[in-house]
Image (tube, helix red, strand yellow):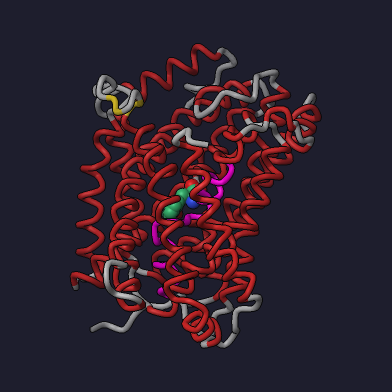
């Protein structure tokens, strides 16, 4: 068997993993959720959940991957056997599902780079921009073509392998993303009237906080950190024992949170400066935001930069989702990386069809009253990913237990500190917290 690939440098690994974490979730979802759920209050809750759940689960996934050097299915089989590999399989299926609609929304961002550059969405009139959006997503061909193009870009990166493909792309794109984001922050906070948005964002409004806010903030924490489907098991499986797991997990979590915070600092001040309500939900990015850009000097340039940023963020995340599937096919079924990538990309593109057409040709096809794309997102973020995180916490906390854990955490060059606290989180806090969200989602508590 071929020797397993490894990350070339610590910086490369951190950029790749932060690239997985930083995605549509940070730039598109986080600001609109903060806009709807009490601004600063949401921010505080979110930070708390990241610290309580996020860090321990990230460490758990990375450790499972690094110690086995295997894909999620193989990793669970090696550590425990029995029915546990099914937990890995659930992750692979979830990765297919998430990727199938992620490339659709990511495809929209590609189209929006073009629409923005040519001036088609450069209008202060909300109805005009709404029509452009609806014509685009309602078209029978364009959303599919854009998703296919995005899938192709993703597959090219993954086919290049861990070092020459994923690590190299991330080392280039993540710093670029950061610079673009800083430019946009400076633009947004210096707009006349931005102060009100900044105040809204930083001053907690606890009156908007209800059970929904808690559920939303925990779900967002999992999604944003790429937890619960084996993405970090997969990336961890390309680490070596020289890597400092705890320090890296802290760094990745910090970067992901910083970038979500900065994205909010672009969008909320800009939205307030333009006098638009901040609680527009998912349409905020594709309908409201262009009208905001159209009101600022040189708005067309900033708008185009913004959609480039969004596409970059989406690309490095889609790469990690595809890598979960490719590593699985490669490890478990013995295909070469190139064939595995092609196979995974073709299957995912076919699965993307219902999402790509969900706002046009197939808009009549709904599940649970939701269009297919929204349904797929809800199923993944509210059920499958928390479920995966739940099982992972139980697995490391109870099944592996303190002895196996201390063997695993001591075997690297940098032992993991605070194992007792970490174990307590995984055994009690994470599972009970997730159970509580689930019951809440079902309307039981
Ligand atoms: N974290 C990404 C975002 O914020 C989405 C994502 C990428 C993801 N890979 C993942 C979510 C793996 C869960 C699991 O957009």
Query: Image height check: is 260 above or below 342?
Result: above
Nearest the eye: 46 or 296: 46
Give x and y (percent) for residue 18: 54, 59
Horizontal placement of 373 versus 118: left or right? left
Query: Image height check: is 141 above or below 23?
Result: above
Horizontal placement of 349 versus 17: left or right? left
Q: Which corner quadrant holds the N terminus?
A: bottom left
Give x and y (percent) for residue 319: 39, 56
Give x and y (percent) for residue 296: 68, 25
- Can residue 100 be seen from the camera position used here? yes
Residue found at x 57% / y 71% = 423
Horizontal placement of 15 versus 331: left or right? right
For the view shown, which residue lies furthest in the front direction?
444
Query: Image height check: is 127 above or below 144?
Result: above
Horizontal placement of 72 versus 241: left or right? left
Q: Say which quarter of the image contains residue 294.
A: top right
Residue found at x 49% / y 61% = 170
Give x and y (percent) for residue 206: 74, 32
Q: Say which quarter of the image contains residue 65.
A: bottom left
Residue 220 located within the stretch drawn in magenta: yes
Mostly what secondary structure, the magenta segment? Answer: helix
Residue found at x 26% / y 60% = 341
Nearest the eye: 13 or 76: 76
Residue range corresponding to the magenta coloring: 217-238
- Can residue 313 be seen from the camera position used here? no
Residue found at x 54% / y 68% = 59
Q: How many marks?
A: 0
């Amino acid at each position: 068997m071929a020797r397993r690939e490894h990350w070339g440098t610590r910086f490369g690994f951190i950029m790749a993993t932060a690239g997985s974490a930083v995605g549509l979730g940070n730039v598109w979802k986080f600001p609109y959720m903060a806009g709807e759920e009490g601004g600063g209050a949401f921010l505080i809750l979110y930070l708390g959940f990241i610290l309580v759940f996020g860090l321990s689960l990230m460490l758990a996934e990375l450790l499972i991957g690094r110690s086995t050097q295997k894909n999620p299915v193989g990793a669970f089989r090696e550590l425990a056997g029995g029915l546990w590999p099914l937990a890995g399989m659930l992750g692979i299926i979830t990765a297919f599902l998430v990727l199938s609609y992620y490339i659709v929304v990511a495809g929209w961002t590609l189209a929006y780079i073009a629409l923005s550059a040519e001036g088609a969405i450069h209008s202060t009139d909300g109805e005009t921009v709404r029509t452009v959006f609806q014509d685009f997503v309602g078209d029978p061909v364009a959303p599919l073509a854009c998703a296919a193009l995005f899938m192709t870009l993703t597959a090219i990166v993954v086919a290049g392998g861990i070092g020459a493909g994923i690590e190299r792309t991330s080392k280039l794109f993540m710093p670029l993303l950061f610079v673009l984001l800083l430019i946009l922050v400076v633009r947004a906070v210096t707009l006349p009237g931005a102060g009100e948005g900044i105040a809204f964002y930083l001053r907690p409004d606890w009156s908007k906080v209800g059970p929904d806010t808690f559920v939303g903030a925990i779900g967002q924490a999992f999604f944003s950190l790429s937890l619960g489907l084996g993405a970090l098991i997969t990336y961890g499986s390309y680490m070596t024992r020289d890597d400092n797991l705890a320090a890296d997990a802290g760094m990745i979590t910090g970067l992901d949170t910083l970038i979500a915070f900065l994205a909010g600092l672009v969008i909320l001040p800009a939205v307030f400066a333009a006098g638009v309500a901040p609680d527009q939900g998912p349409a905020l990015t594709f309908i409201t935001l262009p009208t905001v850009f159209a009101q600022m000097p040189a708005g067309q340039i900033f708008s185009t930069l913004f959609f480039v940023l969004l596409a970059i963020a989406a690309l490095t995340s889609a790469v990690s989702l595809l890598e979960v599937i490719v590593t699985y096919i490669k490890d478990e079924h013995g295909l070469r990386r190139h064939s595995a990538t092609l196979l995974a990309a073709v299957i995912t593109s076919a699965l993307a069809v219902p999402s790509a057409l969900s706002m046009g040709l197939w808009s009549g096809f709904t599940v649970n009253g939701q269009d297919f794309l929204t349904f797929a997102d809800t199923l993944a973020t509210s059920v499958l990913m928390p479920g995966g995180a739940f099982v992972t916490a139980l697995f490391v906390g109870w099944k592996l237990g303190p002895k196996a854990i201390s063997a695993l955490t001591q075997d690297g060059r940098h032992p993991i500190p605070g194992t007792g606290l970490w174990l307590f989180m995984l055994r009690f806090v994470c599972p009970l917290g997730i159970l509580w969200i689930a019951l809440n989602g079902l309307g039981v508590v």
